């Protein structure tokens, strides 16, 4: 391949990589460019490998492409050593898909019962659940009672809407620690997506925990994995993707302002509905640490649907907090999202010698 081709390919690679730094809310095509990032990373790695083996002088071009793409490699595949120090508390994040309440998702509500039992028995100190569903008149779906009151958890449940039967849909946070404050952040968007937070007392510290669910695509994945259906729906798919990309970019900007005004160190849990090669992800990463990157191992794929290899569920945390271990619970398959769980400790400031003496 010619030198011109390699230069052009490298320029394209760098432009695509830089697209994550400009909000799709300003220029929406950049959101689509970010979809090319993993493809370009892989192609540069393949070219570099071939040219090293064949000792081609052109290897400098894919080498630059790999080096500039290193941040994307590091958010894709991580290797962390297990830390021996004891964590202070554990946080669970889970998109429960309304506990499979819809009849087509299970027969006789078996998976619903199993999922609710699992969620209520999990021993995490803090549980953030998206697509939460509660029906106080149901012996199966009286979930605030079963996860909260019956298990001695304090909780904040913010319904997004209530149906004609009185059942509620929304976001919930359950905490073994005392909740001293709670709040709701209404996000801009076409859906009822929003964020909630609680301030909890952990020992001598106060911690703010956010639970968020960013704008959904509202895409039928069957239309993507089926080539015939994709051919008939690609225009609608494009408009849904475009709208979702722009809205989530605006939502994360809105949330970042709220995070910056927090008087306490924070942990952010949620379903981003966004890959880790996006403006949304890297905007959060610019201000917070990612628990998977710092405490996980492997790829951490969190979506349990027909579109494999997606990591869209995340936990982020402040610098004043330390993560020890992060795990994607891929054996818990009740929902179309795997739960994710991380162990944390609040850092202690070192005293100077005069204070110690």
Image (cartoon, grey):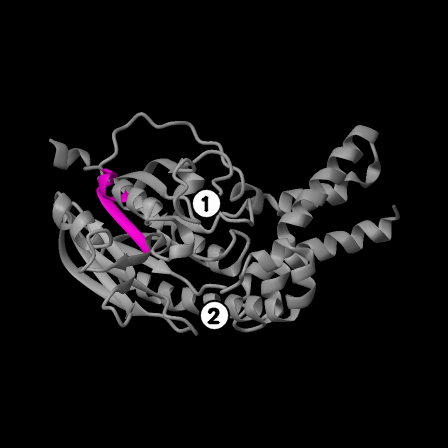
- 17 displayed left or right of 207: right
Residue 15 lies, in percent from the top left, at 67, 59
Q: Which residue is drawn at 46% across and 66% down?
A: 248
Residue corresponding to mark 2:
247
The residue lying furthest to the right in this view is 2
Picture coordinates of residue 76, whole percent (x, y): 54, 42
| Residue 127 horizontal/vertical position (percent) | 26, 47
Which region is colored magenta? 119-130
- Please tell me which residue is depicted at 13% across the width and 43% down the height of the picture: 203
Nearest-to-viewer mark from 2 and 1:
1
Magenta stretch: includes residue 72 = no
The x and y percentages for residue 223 are: 60, 60
Assess disc 2: are there few (<14), some (14-19) or many (≥20) residues with their C-alpha within 10 Å of its C-alpha.
some
Q: What element carries label 1?
A: loop
Number of marks drawn: 2
Up-down relation of residue 202 to residue 137 (above or below): above
Give the secondary structure at mark 2: helix
Residue at left offset 51%, top offset 44%: 75
Q: Which of 238 and 26 is in front in this view?
A: 238
Q: In which quarter of the image is residue 224?
A: bottom right
Judge from the rendering whether residue 55 lies leftward or rightward of residue 191; answer left or right.
right
Determine crowd level at label 1: few under 14, some 14-19, many 20+ residues with C-alpha closer than 10 A. Answer: many
Q: Is residue 330 visible?
A: yes
Nearer-the-camera pick, 334 or 179: 334
- Cα distance in 3D space between marks 2 and 1: 22 Å
Observer able to see residue 263: no
The residue where tag 1 is placed is 302
Foreground pick, 173 / 222: 222
Given residues 290 and 305, the one toward you in this image is: 305
- Does residue 122 belong to the magenta stretch? yes
């Amino acid at each position: 391949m010619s030198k011109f081709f390699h230069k052009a390919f490298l320029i394209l690679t760098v432009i695509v990589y830089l697209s994550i730094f400009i909000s799709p809310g300003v220029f929406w095509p950049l959101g689509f460019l970010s979809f090319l990032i993993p493809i370009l990373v892989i192609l540069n790695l393949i070219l570099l490998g071939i040219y090293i083996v064949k000792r081609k002088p052109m290897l400098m071009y894919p080498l630059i492409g790999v080096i500039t793409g290193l941040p994307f490699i590091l958010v894709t595949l991580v290797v962390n050593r297990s830390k021996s120090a004891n964590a202070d508390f554990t946080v669970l994040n889970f998109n429960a898909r309304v506990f499979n309440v819809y009849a087509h998702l299970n027969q006789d509500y078996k998976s619903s019962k199993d999922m609710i039992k699992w969620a209520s028995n999990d021993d995490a100190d803090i549980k953030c659940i998206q697509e939460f569903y509660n029906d106080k008149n149901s012996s199966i779906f009286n979930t605030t009672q079963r996860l909260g009151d019956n298990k001695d958890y304090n909780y904040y449940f913010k319904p997004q809407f209530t149906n004609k039967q009185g059942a509620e849909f929304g976001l919930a946070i359950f905490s073994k620690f005392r909740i001293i404050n709670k709040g709701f952040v209404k996000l801009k968007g076409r859906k009822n997506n929003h964020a909630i937070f609680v301030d909890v007392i952990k020992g001598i510290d106060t911690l703010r925990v956010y639970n968020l669910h960013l704008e959904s695509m509202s895409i039928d994945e069957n239309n993507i994995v089926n080539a015939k259906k994709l051919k008939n729906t690609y225009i609608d798919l494009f408009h849904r993707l475009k709208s979702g990309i722009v809205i989530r970019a605006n939502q994360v900007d809105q949330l970042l302002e709220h995070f910056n005004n927090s008087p306490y160190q924070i942990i952010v849990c949620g379903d981003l509905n966004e890959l880790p090669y996006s403006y949304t992800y890297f905007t959060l990463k610019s201000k917070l640490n990612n628990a998977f990157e710092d405490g996980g191992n492997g790829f951490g794929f969190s979506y349990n649907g027909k579109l494999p290899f997606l990591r869209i569920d995340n936990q982020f945390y402040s610098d004043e907090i330390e993560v020890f271990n992060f795990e994607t619970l891929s054996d818990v398959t009740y929902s179309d999202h795997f739960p994710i769980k991380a162990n944390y400790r609040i850092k202690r400031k070192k005293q100077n010698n005069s204070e110690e003496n």
